[in-house]
Image (cartoon, grey):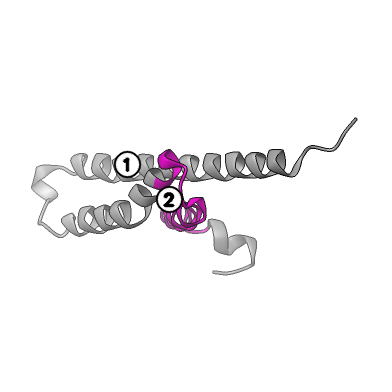
Amino acid sequence: MTDPSPEQLQRNRQLLLRGFVLLSALVGTVFYLGIWLWWWQIPSSRRDGFELIGIVLGTIYFVLFVVPACYFGLKNYALWIGAICGAIALGIATDTVFPWFPWQIFGGP
């Protein structure tokens, strides 16, 4: 059995990194759509306008982190920047959906 060439190893790393970037963009998109679903489920009698803060913050999240991750992943360009954006997007999404998740592992509140 022969060792793979350095070019093959580089392609494998890029493929793995691209998969992570695209997967994180997909998870971020699902999280953003979940924000809109949450908003639509609020009864009209309970809406006072403050719930739109969540929509605005979710849109900022989507534009700043998810869209760049998706763009860099689809273009296969600057994947490290896309991976950083994707990791931040995943961190925000998991901390919002499971607020106990990252902190409970390390013994936090």
Residue at point 9%, 46% (across, down): 45
> Mark 1 = which residue?
34
Q: Position of residue 78 (x, y in %)?
A: 47, 52
**68 drawn magenta:** no
94, 13: nearer the viewer: 13
Q: Quadrant of the N terminus?
A: top right
Is 85 covered by the magenta stretch? yes
Determine which residue is flagged by label 2: 97
Percent position (x, y) of residue 9? 71, 42
Q: Please tell me in which quadrant of the rendered image residue 13 appears.
A: top right
Where disc 2 sits, the SS reads helix
Main SS category, magenta section? helix
Instruction: Provide the residue span drawn in magenta.
Output: 72-100
Secondary structure beneath dot 1 equals helix
The amino acid pointed to by label 2 is Val
The residue positioned 12% from the left and 51% from the top of the image is: 47
The crowding category of the residue bearing disc 2, from other C-alpha atoms within 10 Å (few below 14, some 14 to 19, many at least 20), is: few
The image quarter containing residue 64 is bottom left
Q: Position of residue 75 (x, y in %)?
A: 41, 41
Compared to residue 52, the image places residue 42 above or below, namely above
Residue 86 at what x, y percent from top left?
Answer: 46, 52
Q: Identity of the amino acid at label 1?
A: Gly
Residue lying furthest right: 1
| First of labels 1, 2 by sequence position | 1
